[in-house]
Image: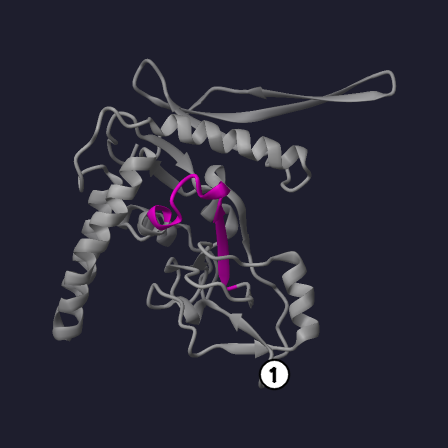
Amino acid sequence: MPFEIPNGWEWCRLQTIASVLTDGTHKTPTYSDKGFVFLSSKNVTSGRIDWNNVMYIPESLHEELYSRLAPQVDDILLAKNGTTGVAAIVDKDCVFDIYVSLGLIRIVNKIILPKYVLYAIGSTFVQDYFKGSLKGIGVPNLHLEHIRKTLIPIPSENEQSHIVKKIEEILPYAEDINNQVDGLRYSVDSAKSKILDLAIQGKLVSQDPNDEPASVLLERIRAEKENLIKQGKLKLDKKESIIYKGDDNFYYTNPMFIRTFQEGNRFFTVFKPEKVRINIS
């Protein structure tokens, strides 16, 4: 694995903790002078959503796009091209639509803090993975299949809160340097990435052995996803895989082996996990 995580933490992929992980419309929009806000990757270049320089689309197009994907507060918007890998959180209750250059990640019932996931995405580890996954000639793109497979280390709920609080205490100092000395931009970016790296490796705040382990949170997410699937609100992800550490201290994944068979007029589907050793670098 890329680095050791504290006891009680768990590795998982973004698709495991997301109820929605998709991108915006692939259609080239027809813009209008007024109407409904339409965001693209250029609106998240700073790591925050720029609500001041937005485009607008007419109501008819908005209704079509919004029926497919309705962004919400605390959703994470991720640039798939342009400023690839830069993410921002939806910080206000606003009706808007997004272009294909943006991915949208919605955490299952916010069981994992969206801000923790946002900061994890900004770490060097995840950003390097994104850079190594870019595809295309001219303007490289980050594809959804790679975003879904992104590894995220998950601490306890209490630990997530401490990490987010500590990050938000420290980052303003880096921002101050950025505002005062343009020549130190590289150092500022490196410092910010280092802070996020320490956070997702469990080295930014002290560990509490009494905290509920992350495995319990992931089990709650799996249960919630099963309920959403039964209610028809979420489709079964046949590519879902579970990451766990074996007794031999190696990491394994359990991809779902699916077999469908028929008895009389009834069809049955069996989901059998297959143990596969993984080496992630």
Query: Could you classify mark 1 by the number of other residues whose Cα lies within 10 Å: few (under 14), some (14-19), or many (20 or more)?
Result: few
**Residue holding disc 1:** 32
Q: Residue at point 47% right, 30% down? A: 220
Q: Residue at point 18% right, 39% down? A: 205
**Lateral position of residue 273 relative to residue 127, left or right:** right
Residue 250, horizontal then vertical, whole percent: 33, 21
Q: Is residue 38 above or below residue 206?
A: below
**Lateral position of residue 24 relative to residue 270, left or right:** left
The front one of 69 and 42 is: 69
Residue 73, horizontal then vertical, whole percent: 47, 57
Q: Secondary structure at mark 1?
A: loop
Residue situated furthest right in the rendering: 265
Residue situated furthest bottom in the rendering: 33
Counting every numbered tag in the picture gives 1
**Lateral position of residue 265 relative to residue 221, left or right:** right
Identify which amino acid the numbered label 1 is placed on: Ser
Q: Residue at point 40% right, 67% down? A: 49
Highlighted magenta segment, given as a residue range = 101-117
Q: Is residue 43 above or below residue 17?
A: below
The front one of 137 and 78 is: 78
